[in-house]
Amino acid sequence: MMKWLRSVVIKLWGTILLLVAVVLIALTILLLEFFNSFHIEQERGHLAKLGQQVETILQAHGGMAAGAQTATEITDIYGATLIATDGTGKIQTNIPDSEASRLIRELERQNWKAVDGEPGHTAIGNYETLQGKAALAYRSTYETSSGTGTIYMLEQLKNIEQANKGARQIIQVGVLLAIIGTTVFAFFLSTRITAPLRAIRQAVVEAGEGKFDQSLKQRSRDEIGDLALAFNDMSSQLNQYVTDLDKERHLLSSILRCMADGVLTFSRDGELLATNPPAESFLAGSAVPTELIDLFQTVMKEGKERTVAFERESRYYIIIVSPLLEQEEQIGAVAVLRDMTEAQQLEKMRADFVANVSHELRTPLVMLQGYSEAIVDGMTESDEATKEFASIIYDESLRLSRLVNDLLDLARMEAGHQELRFETIEAVPFVTRVIKKFKQMGKEKNVTFHVTGENAVFEGDQDKLEQVLTNLLGNALRYTENGEITIQIEDVGEKINLSVIDSGEGIPEEDVPFVFDRFYKADKARTRGGTGTGIGLAIVANVVRAHAGEVDVTSTLGKGSTFRIQLPKQQGKRS
């Protein structure tokens, strides 16, 4: 109900109706006053003429006694009251004498007004003798033989009141019809005016809900039509702005999602506002780390960018926190979380690589230098000693050559520069040929070799795979004595498994995940003074991956190890 009363239609309709009502009421009052004055003036004239006729009759009959009858009859015809007096004080009237005497006294107290263009005077008043009713009075003097007499004529205003009542009814009906017509017209006009306003209001409400792709029809060329055009322009610009903002938001969201670094946005109060997937993965539903909270508080206090490094669950992180500004006001902070674990591992691998290469190169170089100095200084006592020293120098030079060649092969593999020449390989003949290289060494260590499984056929680079099998057999033989080494061949559908199983000392459990790293050696291997370079298994892993295969190891300390290689039978056209 209140909403309906607050409507522009009702307000506009009420305003027009009120203005029209005020004007019509004022006009009614003026018209009624005009008609009342008009009728009174007419009656004044009529009463004055009637008085003149009575005066003429009385004068014509020579006095009141002879003309009274005629004068009374004429007065009765007009429904007036006649009171005539002569010079002797005698009264002639058409009402009781007692009432006539009281009327004369009341008439003498009235304010008489001269009649325009006519002799005599008139007055309007309420008379107690007439039961308080209003009446129009006429007074005039006349001359007779007995002296100067006075004529009083009274006419009640009931005829004027009846005329005024009729006029008032007509005016009231006219006013009512005018109000009804005005109401209909005002409602129609206000509806015509407010209909486009309601359409604009509905469009504004929908725009507030995010519907900016709407257009209003210009129904007129006035201010409301201009308002519709202005709304269309505003809606079009807002739609463009929102579209651009959405594009920027999606672009920013895509950038944040694709970032490798985690991004966390905080409010001024430290509330976490937004994160990207790496940051969510880092938090994993847990609370924000204390290091980050402390750094955030420092940045909010100082207003400067700060960086801190910390370790969490065996991973290394660097957090960069920068203040978030809006019109020079600090409204929060943005933290960039960078996982430095891989970089840390790469740095450690680089340092280990330098240390391992230095260690592996230093041992043969020291021996080369030592034995060559002995020969140069003539410290050998016989030719046999000289040959022995020369043999050691030769072996160490071969070892140094193998190390350099292995390093070069590994570097080419890791750089992706190795070229594979695929050909068809029969598993049993291929394995048997590689085993022949180690028969003599096996006899010396009392180690026997076995090949099990069916003769599967697969594709691969025979030279590279021979290098793989050679490295695995060499490692197995190096750590196995008085035992056996088995190469097991398994045909598993579209793949083939080659497993090298030894009964040697095995690998400590804590060392198993790292055996394929460059220069990695278990502690026992180092203490035994083995001649391995430490990169053979790294070469194995790279060659197998180049063949789209997998390599893994299982080992039990004191019982032996199993290295399993899984390769696809069909390599396709790859190099």
Image: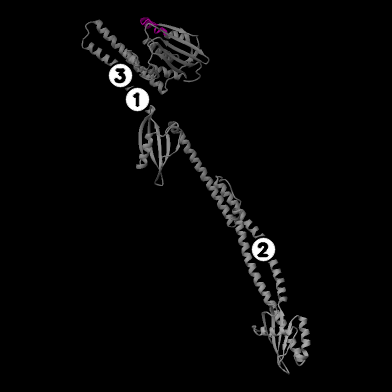
**Residue placed most toward the observer, 94 or 523:** 94
Tell me which label, 2 or 3, sits earlier in the chain: 2
The tag on residue 164 is none
Q: Nearer the viewer, residue 388 or 286?
A: 286
Marks 2 and 1, how far apart at CA: 99 Å
Q: What residue is shown with label 1?
A: 348
Q: Eyeballing the image, is 15 above or below 303? A: below
- Looking at the rendered structure, the secondary structure element under dot 2 is helix
Using the numbered discs, state the Cα–Cα distance from disc 1 to disc 3 in whole angstroms.
16 Å
Q: Examine the rendering and report whether any part of residue 446 can be seen.
A: yes
Residue at image point 27% right, 9% down: 390
Q: Is residue 353 left or right of residue 161?
A: left
Sequence-earlier tag: 1 or 3? 1
Secondary structure under badge 1? Answer: helix
Q: Residue furthest bottom?
A: 145
Q: Nearer the viewer, mark 2 or mark 1?
A: 2
* Residue under pointer 3: 359
* Kind of residue at disc 3: His
**For marks 2 and 1 on the same chain, the one whose residue lies earlier in the sequence:** 2
Chief secondary structure of the magenta portion: helix
Query: Under tag 3, what secondary structure?
Result: helix
Disc 2 + disc 1, Cβ < 8 Å: no
Q: Using the image, tell me which numbered label, if any, was put on residue 179.
A: 2
Cα distance between the residues tagged 2 and 3: 114 Å
Residue 220 falls in which quadrant of the image? bottom right
Start-end of magenta stretch: 435-447
Identity of the residue drawn at 36% across and 5% down: 444
Q: Residue 249 location in percent, x, y?
A: 48, 40
